[in-house]
Image (spheres, rainbow, N blue to C red):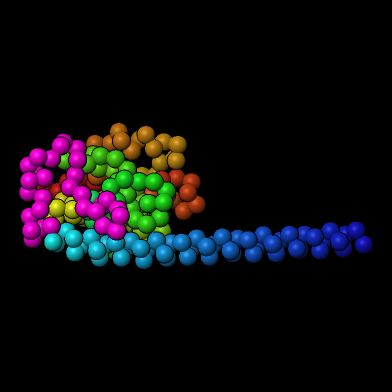
Amino acid sequence: MKQHVRAIVLIVLGLTLICTSAFLFFAYEQEAEIAGENAQQLLGALALEIEQNRKQELYDTARREQVPGQMPLTSLQGYDLMGVIRVPGVGVELPVLNSWNYDLLKLSPCRYSGSIEGQDLILMGHNYKKHFAPLRQVSPGDRVEFLDASGSSHAYVVAGTEVLKPTRLDELTVSESALTIFTCTPGGYGRFVVRCDPIQ
């Protein structure tokens, strides 16, 4: 009788764990889907804004008087955006927010630190399917483009990739790469890092 009760308890416990895992999986998938939709909506608005800025040359004065390390920004829907990151080979085209926190990362990739001018720009994003998960498919030699908020395009080539431990994010800033992009590995046990050099 004791073994029978124990077996029932173990079965109930197992079913509970399976149901909890399924719930967490579907919750994450739904969050990722919403994040993708939000990023695409913001991307569309940003593309229109960049085109308008380019046509009206609103940033000419800002460029001449720009403080070193700062980049042209545009504000949309209450967010400060610095541009668009494109990795054509893996289908990534996303708006980039100027600063980061955990709530902003759920919306779109963000600037972690640095600038285009300083040749030390670092971008970060979640590994959602419609955010930076495709980056794990890039190869050295792939093209990367960054369109800043003024409409200026900056081209890069992937120099290499690496995986860093989450506790070693200090290694992100010691690279001589002009552009670094990173996201979590599946399960969040590491950070997948893409190093890029400018195309002259």
Q: Residue at x 18, y 53 (%)?
A: 149
Is residue 133 at least partly visible in the picture? no
Classify the position of the N terminus by image quarter.
bottom right
Q: Residue at x 18, y 60 (%)?
A: 49
Toward the viewer: 39 or 145? 39
x%, y% of residue 29? 48, 64
Q: Is residue 168 magenta?
A: no
Toward the viewer: 94 or 90? 94
- The image quarter containing residue 46 is bottom left
Toward the viewer: 186 or 41? 41
Where 197 sits versus 15, above or below? above
x%, y% of residue 7? 82, 61
x%, y% of residue 84? 23, 56
Q: Is residue 74 magenta?
A: yes
Tell me: 79 left or right of 106.
left
Q: Residue at x 48, y 46 (%)?
A: 189
Residue that sits furthest to the right in the current view? 1
Is residue 57 at least partly visible in the picture? yes
Tell me: 165 left or right of 81.
right
Q: Residue at x 39, y 46 (%)?
A: 101
Q: Which residues are magenta?
A: 53-81
x%, y% of residue 45? 24, 63
Residue that sits furthest to the front in the current view? 78
